[in-house]
Image (cartoon, helix red, strand yellow):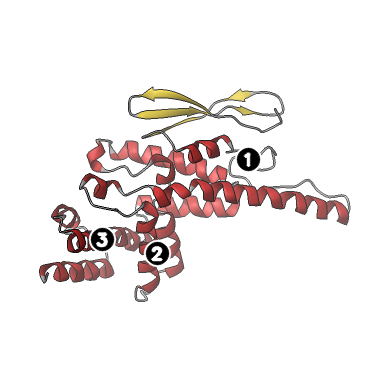
């Protein structure tokens, strides 16, 4: 087993969670464990990627950039750059493959209401990204940042799944699980500036700590009630509870205006 390689051993933590112990073998053969909990068992793809969480090279660890050794000549520098490229590509594909579950995991709220062919988590995030893209310009609001935040705001659900209030899990516990999942995903990505950006965008949204976060949180609710209206129109189901759950909770003018337009269309059916 080479320096920096990892194996993941699953063990049952409780009836509703699964703990993964991730031993990390360093060059000194020191063994450490890190565990995190997920709400349900992972898919075979996600489990495989957890075993691939760390590169066999010690140059990409715990959120740091890849730092090839100083080259003693121009040829050494070229060799070091060439060696770093495969690691970067490998980390990117590992990360994207884990994110595949966002495309296949159905949004739990619709599943529980017996909606037919419900949207996936990725479907939801994609239309939120479009919302951020087409919204009117707002002074001192970074549109690009809003688009990026919409794309990553539910990214931890690739591991923990779509946890909803009906699951009986506290907000603090939900946040803890998602933060641990996000930390793992950023390490899988190889650390560095891109992983840092993903983590910062996710945290900003989670903490509702900026004007961009407030707008994207409104888009999250707007997208949900727009989808609810579409399911009501298409399938004849009553999804009023989703409208009631968001009433009076919009923080921004654009969120209030779009929600009002959706409510108006619903009344005219």
Residue 75: mark in rendering: none
In three-dimensional space, the C-alpha distance between marks 1 and 3, rounded to whole angstroms, equals: 41 Å
Residue of label 3 = 227
Q: Residue tagged by mark 2?
A: 129
Q: Earlier in the sequence, mark 2 or mark 3?
A: 2
Q: Are marks 1 and 3 in contact (CB under 8 Å)?
A: no
Q: Which residue is at 25% across, 52% downward?
A: 116
- Crowding at dot 3, Cα within 10 Å, few <14 / some 14-19 / many 20+, comes out as some
Quadrant where the C terminus is found in the figure: bottom left
Q: Secondary structure at mark 1?
A: loop
Depth check, front residue: 171 or 100:
100
Rendering coords of residue 22 (x, y %): 54, 29
Percent across and percent down for residue 204 are 41, 53
Compared with 211, 87 (above or below) is above
Tell me how far mark 1 sits from mark 2, CA to CA. 31 Å
| Observer able to see residue 151 | yes
Please give the name of the residue rendered at 20% of the width and 56% of the height, measured from the top-left corner.
Answer: 246
Q: Quadrant of the N terminus?
A: top right
Q: Is residue 34 left or right of residue 150?
A: right
Residue 159 appears at what percent x and percent y? 43, 41
- In percent of width and height, residue 45 lies at 50, 40
Total count of labels: 3
> Is residue 140 visible from the viewing direction of this image?
no
Q: Is residue 249 above or below residue 161?
A: below
Q: Nearer the viewer, mark 2 or mark 3?
A: 3
Image quarter of residue 147? bottom left
Question: What residue is shown at x 41% (from left), y 23% (from top)?
Answer: 12
Q: Earlier in the sequence, mark 1 or mark 2?
A: 1
Residue under circle 1? 61
The quarter of the picture where residue 187 lies is: top right
Task: From the viewer's side, name the closer residue of 122 and 134.
Answer: 122
Q: Does dot 2 land on a helix, a strand or a loop? A: helix
């Amino acid at each position: 087993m080479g320096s920096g390689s990892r194996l993941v051993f699953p063990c049952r933590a409780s009836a509703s969670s699964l703990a993964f112990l991730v031993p990390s073998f360093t060059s000194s053969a020191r063994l450490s464990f890190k565990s995190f909990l997920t709400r349900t068992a992972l898919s075979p793809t996600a489990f495989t990627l957890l075993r691939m969480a760390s590169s066999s090279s010690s140059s990409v660890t715990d959120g740091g950039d890849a730092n090839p050794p100083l080259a003693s000549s121009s040829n050494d520098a070229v060799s070091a750059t060439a060696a770093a490229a495969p690691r970067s590509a490998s980390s990117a594909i590992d990360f994207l493959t884990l994110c595949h579950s966002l495309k296949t995991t159905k949004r739990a709220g619709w599943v529980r209401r017996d909606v037919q062919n419900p949207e996936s988590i990725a479907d939801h995030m994609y239309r939120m990204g479009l919302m951020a893209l087409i919204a009117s310009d707002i002074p001192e609001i970074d549109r690009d940042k809003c688009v990026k935040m919409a794309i990553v705001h539910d990214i931890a659900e690739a591991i923990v799944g779509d946890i909803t209030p009906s699951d009986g899990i506290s907000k603090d516990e939900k946040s803890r699980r998602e933060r641990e999942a996000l930390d793992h995903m950023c390490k899988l990505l190889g650390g560095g500036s891109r992983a840092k950006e993903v983590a910062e965008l996710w945290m900003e949204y989670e903490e509702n700590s900026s004007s961009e976060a407030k707008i994207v949180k409104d888009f999250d609710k707007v997208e949900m009630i727009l989808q609810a209206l579409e399911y009501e129109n298409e399938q004849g189901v009553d999804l009023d509870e989703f409208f009631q759950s968001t009433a009076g909770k919009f923080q921004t003018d654009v969120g209030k205006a779009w929600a009002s337009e959706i409510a108006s269309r619903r009344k005219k059916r």
